[in-house]
Image (cartoon, rainbow, N blue to C red):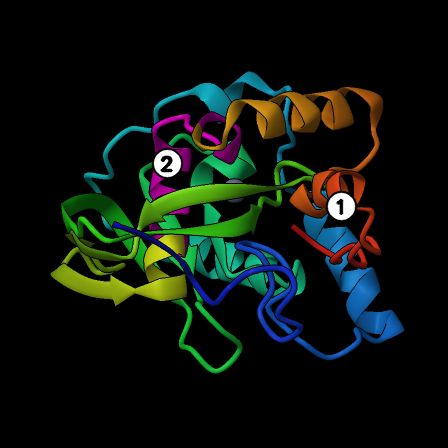
Amino acid sequence: MSEHSDIELDEPHEGPVEGDATPDEPTEEELRRRDAALAEVVVYGDPVLRSKASEVREFSQALREEADHMVAIMRDAMGVGLAATQLGVLRRMLVFQAGPDATPTALLNPVIEWSSADLATAAEGCLSLPRVIVDVERPLHVRVSGADIAGEPILIEASGLEARVLQHEIDHLDGVLILDRTERDQRKAALRALREGTSFTPFDEEAEDDDAEPEPAHEGG
Ligand code: ZN
């Protein structure tokens, strides 16, 4: 069964995955910090984004500092998730914060233990795919095991946006991008936008189809 979730672009208070976690207009200082953070994120074309990350075996102080750094980048970039791969580090580590009030969490060696048969389609952006948003269908609920930053086992039951963010970031650890999970037409249009340095959102297509007013482009992503 498939249903549309509530995190589409046309909902003004819910941004796409990895983009636009804060609904308010960013200040100039916030925009400056975002640009600095985004400068550290690897973008499409770098082969590291297509590589499989290795399991974390040592839970050191250095790892903790790396996780803190990832959380800082995620927040400054106004994202809701970040995989180590996106900083060029092939380690199975991700951070996520599904919403501005959620606690940022680091997750190591994540494994999707179970996912629901219920699916939902929503628009997703990616910090590594600038100015591109595509529709992605994913299970609505997941159960993810892994370790916390101290190496203690954790189990996360997630739904909605949180489930979507976790699946998106775990994909990164396997070299999988939202381009691989969207429909063919959107993938082609997104690839063209990446090649030409322009933007793509599914609303571009809808605007062409039914002559509707195009949606305003979301920042981040
Ligand atoms: Zn991403």
Residue drawn 63% across the image and 60% down it? 9
| Placement of 63 over or under 154, stated as above or below | above
* Sequence-first disc among 1 and 2: 2
On residue 194, the disc is: none
The stretch of residues the image draws in magenta is 165-180
Q: Secondary structure at mark 1?
A: helix
| Placement of 174 over or under 134, stated as above or below | above
Magenta stretch, main secondary structure class: helix
* Crowding at mark 1 (Cα within 10 Å: few <14, some 14-19, many 20+): few
Relative to the observer, which residue lies in front, 216 or 130?
A: 216
Q: Is the Cβ of the residue at disc 1 closer than 8 Å to that at disc 2?
A: no
Quickly name the residue at label 1. Answer: 210
Say whether residue 139 is magenta.
no
Quickly name the residue at label 2. Answer: 171
Check disc 2 and give the amino acid type.
Asp
Q: CA distance from mark 1 to mark 2?
A: 33 Å
Relative to the observer, which residue lies in front, 98 or 55?
A: 98
Residue 35's spot in the image, x, y percent? 78, 53
Residue 156's spot in the image, x, y percent? 19, 63
Residue 90's spot in the image, x, y percent? 40, 30
Relative to the observer, which residue lies in front, 155 or 183?
A: 183
Answer whether residue 36 is visible to the viewer in this image.
yes
Residue drawn 53% across the image and 43% down it? 135
Q: Image quarter for residue 163? A: bottom left
Q: Secondary structure at mark 2?
A: helix
